[in-house]
Image: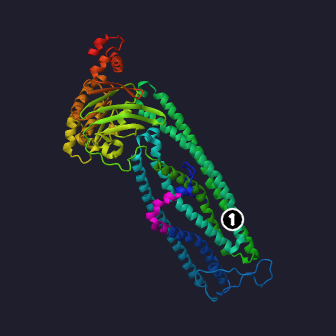
Amino acid sequence: MFGGGGGPGRMLGQEISKPVNVSKTLGRLASYFKPFWPVLLLVAVLIIANTYTQVITPELTGQSIDCYLTPATASRFSGGQTAPAMPAAGSETGASQPQAQTNCWFDPLPANASTSDYIAGLGRLILVILGLFVFGSIMGGAQFFLMSYAGQHVLKGLRVDVFQHLHKLSLNYYAENETGNVMSRITNDMETLNQAISFALVNVTGGMLLLVWVAYNMLAKNWAYALISMIVVPVMIVVTSIISERARTAFRVTRKEIGKVNADLQESISGVREVQAFGREDANIESFRQSNAANRDANINAVAITATLAPTLEALGYLAIAITTVVGGILMLRGSNFLGTTISLGLIITFLGYVQRFNQPIQQISTLWANIQSAVAGAERIFGLLDIQPDVVDAPNARSMPAIVGKVEFENVNAAYVKNDPVLCGVSFTATPGQMVAIVGPTGAGKTTIINLIPRFYDITGGQIRIDDIDIAGVTRASLRKQIGMVLQDTYLFSDSVMNNIRFGKPDASDAEVQAAAQLSRADEFIQRLPQGYATVLGEHGAGLSQGQRQLLSIARAALTNPRILILDEATSSVDTRTERQIQQALETLLKGRTSFVIAHRLSTIRNADLVMVVEDGQIVESGKHDELLAKKGAYYNLHMRQFVREENPNGHNPQPEAAAAN
């Protein structure tokens, strides 16, 4: 019945946004559908066939009245003979009355047909109507299945393209864009597109075709009676548009409020230790209660608005039925020739069926069309992401990096994350093969930028970086990076087994090679104590392991790839002294024979460095060995003294400089 479309009602709950460049977006989306054009063609045929069954059944229902029921009743009261048309009220008895021109599905029965003949004909027609219902249901199910089949393959390809593109984007993109915003391209926008392809598009297309087809049939049979029957349609369209727009606005509020609820949950769960430590449980619960209540009120308001649509359209639908019935009944009883056509009972029944068929798609089209717009807008955002060009790309004639020996040269290197805001200015140094280079300096001096330039995570804005006398800008990033190992301060471990986490950088490594790398990094001892040893599946980000254990796994991961250049970014800054010594022992084994760059948080860990570089304000202000730099009593000496005072004299007592240097 009218307004009962559960699907469209649910679709109102989505946050609606409008596209900017529809034609361009649809053109790009259509290119993904090209391999499935036979499926789309079949879907179009099925939509036409399904729509035909919906258009023809009211016609056949009317024929059951005019071709079989009315003549059979007349025959029954005339001794088995077909009776002439009954005179209209108020007309002269026996006067000739205009007859409705009814085209019956089967050949007309002869004039002497009996009542049983009419019953048999009616039975055949009912079987045809039932057959059409079954046929239409099969066609409807088939069109949704085929459209979903093509749509899911398209979405799969689109997801893969986005995922591949995300891996090509430079780190600068992720520094400027929140992870949640990036994730929404593959989740929210893709899901909006999914619903439009699988559900909304077929319904809107079929609904539009049904509207046009039904309107044509009604106007062809009796245009004046058709216009009267459709008199409430404009009202239905206006009401649906107004309520749908209000509902979409209300649901935007619900999306905002549920976002606050999720934010409260995330903060409370992530900071549960701090909450309990400071006794903030009650305050957090009250804050969550308020945000949850706001979410409840927003949803109730949105549902209340949406709930008015169905009964309103239901009432207007019944009004359309009433108008069609009353006007048609009056004209039939008067027996008048209404604009050249006699209104028969069968024609009234046919128009009643048409009115139902005509009104049903209006709500669907009004609500689902907005969702199609939202899906196109989502596709625009997806394609917008695919159009982002990475900052760091391989040169057109880039070649593979040959096996690295380990010589690294920076020559007048400049770097900037933002234009006209330099991070490095004229940095020059040379690291010989097997040399350990320590980089120290205050926060924000440019230490991490230097090590990020070696594997070309970022491109320089001036100067040149060479490895083994080869400009790294002329080699492929993949061939360069696979020969460089990194152990970072924040070790990222995947929700996978310990074995697979270690072999992440070398997927084809054997179990024996993985275990050897773990033994080298001193990680084998604690791995053996895990419930399933190397087969133990780690939690998110290595949950369940200490910071030191995660660092040892990171060292094992780097050792397995056997890199010629190794980068350590404050690898021991977040662990205790005992764990630090354990990690240092593992690193000493790993660093042998490799060129290494170490960003040191604790200066005591770089006493044996071959070269110490002090970076301040994007420039190397001092370089040399540990003892040499202390003797100069310059920038490095000042860093060392400040750290020594903090670590050895927490009460603020200043030792003699000479004694401190000796330490």
Pick the residue in front: 337 or 233. 233
Pick the residue in front: 639 or 487. 639
CA neighbours of label 1 inside 10 A, class few (<14), some (14 to 19), many (20+): many
How many labels, in total?
1
| Residue drawn at the location 22% of the way across and 39% of the way down | 517
In reply to whether residue 28 is colored magenta, the answer given is yes
Quadrant where the C terminus is found in the figure: top left
Question: Which residues are drawn in magenta?
Answer: 26-43
> In the image, what residue type sits under mark 1?
Met
Q: x, y (%) of residue 614?
A: 35, 25
Pick the residue in front: 216 or 574. 574
Q: x, y (%) of residue 254?
A: 55, 43
| Position of residue 38 in the picture relative to residue 216 (left or right) | left
**Does residue 129 show up?**
yes
- The dominant secondary structure in magenta is helix
In reply to whether residue 455 is colored magenta, the answer given is no
**Does residue 187 show up?**
no
Q: Secondary structure at mark 1?
A: loop
| Position of residue 130 in the picture relative to residue 88 (left or right) | left
Q: Which residue is mark 1?
A: 230
Q: Quadrant of residue 624?
A: top left
| Residue drawn at the location 40% of the way across and 49% of the way down | 163
Question: Where is 135 relative to 367, above or below?
Answer: below
| Position of residue 363 in the picture relative to residue 658 (left or right) | right
Q: Quadrant of residue 224?
A: bottom right
